[in-house]
Image (spheres, grey):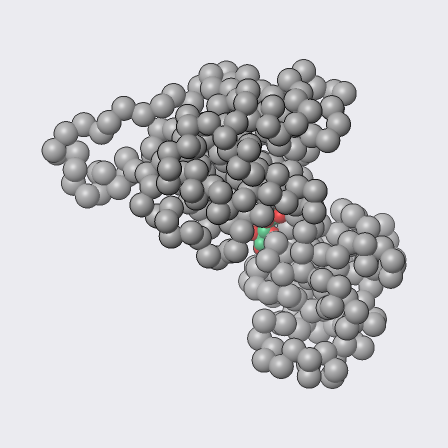
Amino acid sequence: GVLMACPMSSYLEQELDKRFKLFRFWNVPQKNEFLNQHANSIRAVVGNAFAGADAELIDSLPKLEIVSSFSVGLDKIDLNKCKDKGIRVTNTPDVLTEDVADLAIGLMLAVLRRICECDRYVRKGLWKSGDFKLTSKFSGKSVGIIGLGRIGLAIAKRAEAFGCPISYYTRSEKPNTNYKYYPSVVELASNCQILVVACALTPETRHIVNREVMEALGSKGILINIGRGPHVDEKELVSALLEGRLGGAGLDVFENEPEVPEQLFGLENVVLLPHVGSGTEETRKAMADLVLGNLEAHFLNKPLLTPVV
Ligand code: 8YV
């Protein structure tokens, strides 16, 4: 049997239903009772960015062999526990990189050129009463990226095409890039106009964008988050934006999804998206096929397609 942690893709559900006994965990009213009854038949968990396999779930599934995540991010999976127990873990890298990087650029353009506000202006019939106010240029602005992995690099490549000087922060300098390295996030933020979060969420990167970083980014600086909500101290972000200590923000992720701080709803220098970085038909299909391919490989004793553990 396969346990799906929460709804993520109807195509994936349908394909899992064809191949396995699929348990939809979100439909289970009494989780403990369900686990008492079915735990011994569950050999795989399929999770995503919202629900994965924490220590408690892993411990309650004695026959668990593999956790296959419908996401590149692994922050909802207890990787150490999986390692200790010999449970395999897979994710969905590469197939979503372009979409997430595209959306990061979209957020930069949307915040600086006020695309969403412009759209509301037209729909409200305000154009007839006068031209829209002037906005800020994107091309040529300096872009600082936290995390220069697959997604960070794809954002850098795109921003380069807009003539943006690129700098980055990672724990250690990358040998194979000409982008400018800063050994701290505060230094990166002090030296760029647009700061992008594109690293993995770990205990070390939680609140990596804190008050000090926002101060360094400054009242003209733009924060873009396509990583995870908890990368940013959201309380501090809200007050920085409300008090005009930060120039603007483009956010695809939040600390407590699907909750979004309502204080942000009135701010036109902020663009709020419902965690849609990988949300295209094409990419979600490719992610689902990777989950299926990994499970198939595992149960046929073949090498996993995208192993993490
Ligand atoms: C979500 C993501 O997994 O890949 C990630 O890390 O956050 C997304 O792709 C997806 O939206 C959840 O179904």
In this rendering, would 5 be left or right of 1? left
Please give the name of the residue rendered at 70% of the width and 19% of the height, measured from the top-left corner.
177
- Comparing 94 with 34, the one in front is 34
Q: Residue at x 32, y 25 (%)?
A: 135
* Residue 44, image x, y percentages: 76, 65
Find residue 119 and report its horizontal and vertical position in percent: 28, 39
- The residue lying toward the viewer, choosing from 213 and 172, is 213
Residue 84: image quadrant is bottom right
Q: How many marks?
A: 0
Q: Identify whether 172 is placed above or below 66.
A: above
- Is 153 on the left or on the right of 106, as rendered? right
- Residue 152 seen in this snapshot: no
Question: In the rendered view of the protein, which quadrant contains the N terminus?
Answer: bottom right
Measured as percent of width and height from the top left, residue 193 is found at 48, 23
Q: Vertical placement of 172 versus 306: above or below? A: above
Task: Name the residue rendered at 60%, 65% in the picture.
Answer: 6
Asked which quadrant contains residue 85, the reply is bottom right
Q: Is residue 53 visible?
A: yes
Which residue does the image show at 65% across and 78% down from the upper left?
Answer: 31
Q: Between 37 and 208, which is closer to the camera in this rendering? A: 208
- In the displayed structure, does residue 47 sit left or right of residue 246? right
Q: Is residue 123 above or below residue 29?
A: above
Residue 229 x/y as whole percent: 55, 47
Q: Is residue 299 above or below residue 110?
A: below
| In front of the other: 106 or 216 | 216
